[in-house]
Amino acid sequence: MSIIDPVGDMFTRIRNGQMRNLSFVIVPASKFRVKILDILKNEGYIANYIQENSDTNKKTLKVNLKYYEGSPVIKEIKRISKPGRRVYSRANSIPRIQNGLGLAIISTPQGVMSDVDARKNNIGGEVICKVF
């Protein structure tokens, strides 16, 4: 079975895992997903992630979810730019999520970065998702 939107699939697995109060979820590995998970880890939305090899010689990512007083740290994680409709933003019009309390992940020519870093470097790009 092929996955049409691998990044959206990763977000759905994280959302579903947090609804079930799981300590971790398993996601197929890719370089793009690792960069997104790096940002989520640095911003404090997930505890950690580990890259593992499965029995079928495919790499997977074990994402350790983070909770605060029993409730998930990630209240909402939503895909903005989808395969059927890409959403791009200039550096001066990158959306602020919840008046700066949330996070937008942007794919720029200099790599994947948070909205704060993209504004600081004055770089626009594709808006991947919003996290709050």
Image (cartoon, grey):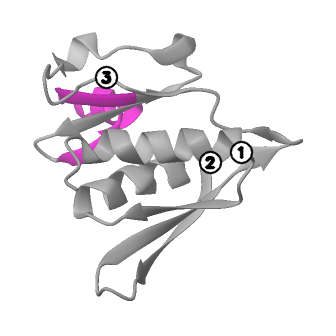
Question: Nearer the N terminus, badge 3 or badge 2?
Answer: 2
Residue 122 makes an appearance in the image: no
Q: Nearer the viewer, mark 3 or mark 2?
A: 2
How far apart marks 2 and 1 lie (CA) works out to 5 Å
Residue at 36% across, 30% down = 129
Which quadrant holds residue 116? Answer: top left
Q: Amino acid at mark 2?
A: Gly
Q: Position of residue 7 (x, y in %)?
A: 31, 44
Residue at 22% across, 27% down = 82
Contact between marks 3 and 2 (CB within 8 A): the answer is no
Question: Nearer the N terminus, badge 1 or badge 3?
Answer: 1
Q: Residues within 10 Å of mark 2 (few under 14, many from 20)?
A: some
How far apart marks 1 and 3 lie (CA) works out to 24 Å
Bounds of the magenta segment: 111-129
Q: Position of residue 74 (x, y in %)?
A: 63, 35
Q: Amino acid at mark 1?
A: Arg
How far apart marks 3 and 2 lie (CA) works out to 20 Å
Q: Quadrant of the C terminus?
A: top right
Front in this rendered view, residue 115 or 10: 10
Disc 3 is placed on an element classified as loop
Q: Quadrant of the N terminus?
A: bottom left
Residue underneath mark 1: 20
Residue underneath mark 3: 80
Query: Disc number at residue 17?
Result: 2
Residue 18 makes an appearance in the image: yes
Say if 113 sits above or below 87 in the image: below
Disc 1 is placed on an element classified as loop
Disc 2 is placed on an element classified as helix
Residue at 17% across, 38% down = 108
Front in this rendered view, residue 99 or 13: 13
Contact between marks 2 and 1 (CB within 8 A): the answer is yes
Q: Amino acid at mark 3?
A: Ile
